[in-house]
Structure formats: C-alpha cells, structure tokens
Amino acid sequence: MAKAFSVKDLRFKYPSAAEDTIKGINFDVEEGEIFGLLGPSGAGKSTTQKILVKLLADYRGSVKYFGQDLKALGPAFYEEIGVGFEMPVHFSKLTALENMEFFAGFYKRTADIQELMERVGLWEHRHRKVGEFSKGMKVRLNFVRALLNRPRVLFLDEPTNGLDPKNARILKDMIAEYRKQGGTVFLTTHLMNDVEQLCDRVAFCVAGQLVEISAPRDLKLKYGKREVKVEYRTNGTLASAVFPLDGIGFNEDFGRLLQTQQVETIHSGETSLEEIFIIVTGVELDEHADPVD
Ligand SMILES: Nc1ncnc2c1ncn2[C@@H]1O[C@H](COP(=O)(O)OP(=O)(O)OP(=O)(O)O)[C@@H](O)[C@H]1O
Ligand SMILES: [Mg+2]
C-alpha cells in the first residue's frame, strides 16, 4: 500500500504563541485506511489537520503526500482531498442546495449532490436557508460538502459532534463505505465510539506530541488484563470470581463454577478505549464536549 501521508518531525508554532503547538510528530497514513487522531482538547489535532490540508504553511519538518513534498503541490491537491472542518462553514443566507452547488463549482470532478443529501436526510430540506438549520443539520451538510469532489483522501474533524445516535450512525456507515471503495480517511475525534467503530489505527495526541500509534484492538490487548471475570448468583446474591486467561480451558475451579453456579456474565479483561485514553493521555474524557455552536 502507498502512503497517503508521511509525516516526519513535524513542528508548528502559531505566530501569537510562545512555544510550538506541534512538537515533533511522526506518523504515516496508509492509503485505504481510516487513521484516527485522538486526544484531549487543545492537544493539536485540528492544527495537525490544518497543516495536512495546506491551510497552515509555516511548519517545520517534512510532510509528504503520496511521496511528494506537500509544500510543492499546486491546486491539483485540492481536487483530490475532501475536508470537513471542525466548525461548519456555510453561507447562511443561501439554501442548503445552493451552498452545495456553489462549493461543487470549484471542482472538476463532482459527486451526486442529491444522492449525498438524501443519505444524510437533508434532501427534503434542500430549499431551506442554512441559517435556519439546526446544529446537527449543519454538521451533516458539512459532511456532504467534504464529499462533493469524490475525494481520494477525506479529512474529517469531529464529524459526528452534535449528532444524535441515528445520524451519527448514518455518517459512520458512509465513512466506512467510502473506505471500502478505496478511500483514505484522516479522522480527528475525541469520541471513543467513532474510533472503536471506524479506525484501523489510532494515534494519541497529547500536548503536541504523539504518545501511541496502534490498532484499537492491539491497544485494548496491550493495556488490558489477561483475565476472565465471572459474575454468578449464589443464594440470591451476586458474587464474582476472576481467573487467569492463560490456561483457562484447563482451570478446574473455572470449570466447576460454570457447571455448578448460575452464571450471569463472563467478561475477558481487555480495557475499553476510554480507559486507555485516560491512561495514555492522563486526561479524563468529556464525551459531552461539543465545539459546534
Ligand atoms: N489560530 C491560533 N492561534 C494561536 N493559537 C491557536 C490557534 N488555533 C489553535 N491554537 C492553540 O493551539 C492549541 C491546539 O489547538 P487545536 O485546535 O489544534 O486543538 P484540538 O486538539 O483540535 O482541540 P479540540 O479537541 O478542542 O478541538 C491550543 O492550545 C489552541 O489554543
Ligand atoms: Mg479540534
């Protein structure tokens, strides 16, 4: 597989900031994968995305896009990428459809706007002004906008923030389908559900540095305990017992418990991504944080 992005010792300082916001990060995004960038608020996730889409130019280090230096790429780069920004940006006096037609006009290659708007449940609202849209409707329209040019690489910054579970599901299904059709996704999020359901690999960003890059499953195994917990009911009260996972098939106590007790749950001890987030970043998750207003 080709590398969609290859990032080496990336550093970036905002002109008004005293020190670097991005402090020397290294990662690759493989073509055809969903790469998640995870981390607490202010860690530098959106800044990293803005660098990769050439919005912030004065970075140090090297960023290659399919082997080419990002700084040397011309406007053709924008034909190839789709970008969903953290804050939806639309013309509030134009209708939803007028907005999409306007943005599609920048591209040589365009997607079927009706099909995309139908998928996210906005086609029936296409003639309404975006200024009248609810937060979730704007988020969905922002997603459609990112797909307008049938991009080769899709950047999504907190794509499901502010969505109800049903609409979040629809977007996640569309992201997974996009990947299945060969697309590459760079996804920024602090929602564990998004990572769990979508990402092939995830990088943890903390204070401008990457502290872990791994497949979600490998992380769960690495940070998890190799043990099995059984909850069972005995004389009407709930009890539990923990057994080592290794050799569990030959563990006589475990076998006896299963045969003689009324078992209610059995769980192996892999850690949830939420716990891993706290271990790795040292920051408690705020699942309700919502930057979209
Ligand atoms: N235009 C700017 N000028 C100066 N500092 C900025 C600017 N934009 C962001 N920062 C700072 O850079 C740091 C990283 O911000 P960034 O938006 O990349 O974080 P994030 O990881 O995306 O956070 P969140 O989860 O809240 O979206 C923060 O300390 C932020 O205050
Ligand atoms: Mg952000």
Image: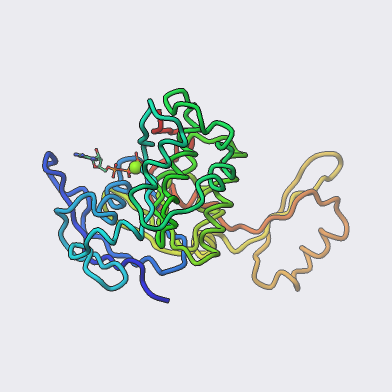
**Is residue 123 shown left or right of residue 142?**
right
Quadrant of the image containing the N terminus = bottom left
Compared with 78, 291 (above or below) is: above
In this view, 80 is above or below 55: below
Residue at figure coordinates x 25%, y 71% from the top left = 68
> Viewed as shown, does residue 204 lie left or right of 63?
right
The chosen color scheme is rainbow
Q: Position of residue 198 (x, y in %)?
A: 53, 56
Q: Where is residue 12 in the image (x, y as percent from the top left)?
A: 18, 52
**Quarter of the picture for ligand 1?**
top left
52 up-or-down from 19: above or below: below
Q: Is residue 213 visible?
A: yes
Q: Which residue lies furthest to the top in this view?
A: 132
Residue at (50%, 46%) from the top-left corner? 113
Instruction: Please state if 89 lies on the left or on the right of 230 as rendered.
Output: left
Q: Nearer the viewer, residue 252 or 185?
A: 185
Q: Nearest the camera: 85 or 161?
A: 85
Q: Position of residue 112 (x, y in %)?
A: 51, 51
Picture mark count: 0
Please state if 237 lies on the left or on the right of 182 as rendered: right
Q: Quadrant of residue 293?
A: top left
Residue 4 on image: x %, y %: 36, 67
Q: Is residue 282 visible?
A: no
What residue is drawn where x is 14% and y is 46%? 19
Q: Which of 210 and 134 is in front in this view?
A: 134
